[in-house]
Amino acid sequence: MTAPFLPMSFNEMKRLGWEQLDVLIVTGDAYVDHPAYGTALIGRLLESQGYKVGIIAEPDWKDPQSFTRLGRPRLAVLINAGAVDSMIVNYTANKRPRRDSISHMPDRACIVYTNCIRAAFKGVPVILGGIEASLRRLAHYDYWDDKPRRSLLLDSKADMIIYGMGERPLIEVIDRLNKKETISSIRDLPGTVVALKPSELPSGALMLPSFEEVSQNKAAFNKAFSLAYREMNALRGKPLAQPHADRLVLQLPPALPLTTEELDRSYDLPYARRWHPSYDAQGGVQGFEVVRWSITAVRGCPAECSFCSLTMHQGRVIQSRSERSILKEVERITKDKEFRGTISDVGGPTANLYAASCKTWEKAGACQNKQCMMPEKCPSLKLGLDKAITLYRAIRKIKGVKHVFVSSGLRYDLLVKPEAQEYLRELCAHHISGQMKVAPEHTQDHVLRLMNKPSYKVYE
């Protein structure tokens, strides 16, 4: 039997006939069972593999019992701060506390939650994931401290970080723990970061400047980042080792991008597409309506904008869902009694890169010394605009659908290409809810060059 929601209380576990969880997920976000929320996606995916999964959402980090209400899990605790880094949630760009924040997250949530779990469940493996952990996996510059900080793995004292979107390595880690492997023995899995003794350095690893070096020397910091950036390749990337005093932080190469079939599987799972009933008394979860009727169609972005986290998190290789999977999700949405006929978005990081492909991606991953989009689109990058048009038209024909909007951002330098004119006409005629989401980011070319964005003339 599939539960309407993953349990958040011991009574819910009892109703399912469970005495103990296999995996506990702790998150700084509210629990909304919708595929736009990473906790729900990961939880449902583990459930589909036969594991008993429970969720502790927005725990009171000052109350130890807030972390123990579902009991000690059999295999592991997974921790994520949420969809946004906790410091961005809690502070403005001027480093002042946000007055409008409704967050229950502590500052540096991954560190705080890990410490609470360590105190509650000694010996249980703790694995970090999500954007906060993913982007802090090596020594990194911290805007709020205005200085480099150590890898979050060491600061939190977690056992492992799974970086990127995480489905593939997470399933393997949990399967191996289920087969009685110890977390300390899992040192070979792409998409993970672990801590080692210097004597345990694997052969072939690329040594980065140490935390101590990057803390004192900007050139060393830039070298470390550049080397790590160049190795973000699942097929050709090398393991990276960065000394931190007497420890080594080892980052294995990225996990392979998901195939279309694997991506479909993640989004075809039986989501309730609602917030957990425990939020009913407070009127629900703020922000959910924005994504409630949205469809994630694509992952990844090959644009490499220098201010964006996508390259280091989702990667440069485009991963697209099948038309079948997307239409199936739309049909499920139309059966919801609260649906009023508007699909609010069919997109992802870049909506008009749905079904884009490159033969190099399949054979060797993204190019190391050549960009896909700058200074012009690479001829090898094939846009999937015809497939997108076919998809949009098919969604419009589904009974109960009145409007299909594309609210995700659009790469405007691709919209002005001759081969994009039919797509642009289709978009403007049927899929713009009010304003097309394009972002010039700046008006001055010397700034745009630093941002790795096209000239403002392209936007005009």
Image (tube, rainbow, N blue to C red):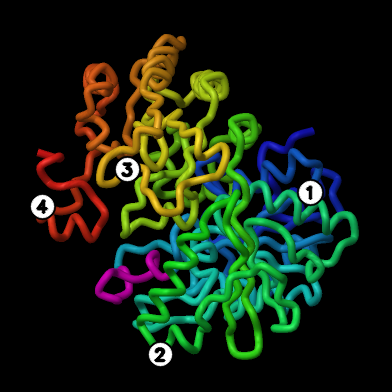
Q: Relative to 154, is 442 above or below? A: above
- SS of the residue under disc 2: helix
Comparing 115 with 349, the one in front is: 349
Which of the marked residues, 4 or 2, is nearer the chain's N terminus? Answer: 2
Which of the marked residues, 4 or 3, is nearer the chain's N terminus? Answer: 3
Mark pair 4, 2: CA separation: 35 Å
Would you say the magenta stretch is mainly helix, strand or loop? loop
Residue beneath disc 1:
52
User: In this picture, which residue range is highlighted in magenta?
Assistant: 87-98
Using residue 255 as the reference point, say whether residue 460 is left or right of it: left
Which of the marked residues, 4 or 1, is nearer the chain's N terminus? Answer: 1
Which of the marked residues, 2 or 1, is nearer the chain's N terminus? Answer: 1
Residue beneath disc 4:
443
Residue beneath disc 2:
216
- SS of the residue under disc 3: loop
Q: Which mark is residue 373?
A: 3
Mark pair 4, 3: CA separation: 19 Å
Mark nearest the camera among 4 and 3 is 3
Name the amino acid, label 4: Thr
Mark pair 2, 3: CA separation: 34 Å
Residue drawn at (67%, 65%) of the image:
127
Q: Quadrant of residue 33?
A: top right
Task: Residue 322: give x, y in percent of width and height.
Answer: 54, 24
Q: Is 60 one of the magenta-colored residues?
A: no
Task: Residue 23: give x, y in percent of width and height.
Answer: 75, 56
